Amino acid sequence: MKKTRASMLANTLKIPPSRALEAVIKAQLIAAVIKAASKKGLTHELLAQRSGLSRSAVTGILAGSVQKVTINRVLRLVEAAGLVAEVKVKEVA
């Protein structure tokens, strides 16, 4: 079976695969927000206003402090950046 980033992370950090997968998904979403914000000239303050999060929360999330951040909060930033997230699920080979 092919190892995924999440399964390798789970093995390395000795955490459940579901937590590792969540971390990988958050990282991918945040990277997309950072890229879109940079491209569109969106400030942390503007992202905060659009998402309903505090500016300090936005700054923390975009700086990688996501340990206690929910997917919901990250998705609010995705929307604030003018993006749409899609989920793809496939059967294990």
Image: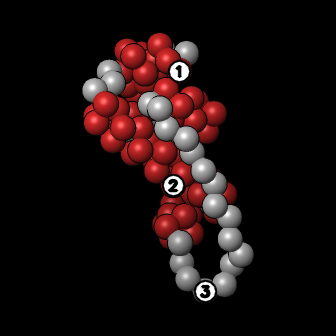
SS at circle 1: helix
**Type of amino acid at the residue the image marks with label 2:** Val
Horizontally, is 25 left or right of 89 in the view?
left
Q: Earlier in the sequence, mark 2 or mark 3?
A: 3
Residue at mark 2 to residue at mark 3: CA–CA distance: 19 Å
Q: Which residue is mark 3?
A: 1
Q: Which residue is mark 1?
A: 51
Looking at the rendered image, the disc whose residue lies closer to the viewer, 1 or 3, is 1
Q: Residue at x 28, y 34 (%)?
A: 38
Nearer to the camera, 52 or 60: 52
Q: Which residue is mark 2?
A: 24
Q: Earlier in the sequence, mark 1 or mark 3?
A: 3
Q: Give the percent coordinates (x, y) of residue 56.
A: 41, 17
SS at circle 2: helix
Q: Decide: is 40 above or below 32.
A: above
Q: Residue at x 47, y 13 (%)?
A: 49
Q: Give the percent coordinates (x, y) of residue 27.
A: 46, 48
Quick one: label 2, few (<14), some, or many (20+) residues within 10 Å? some
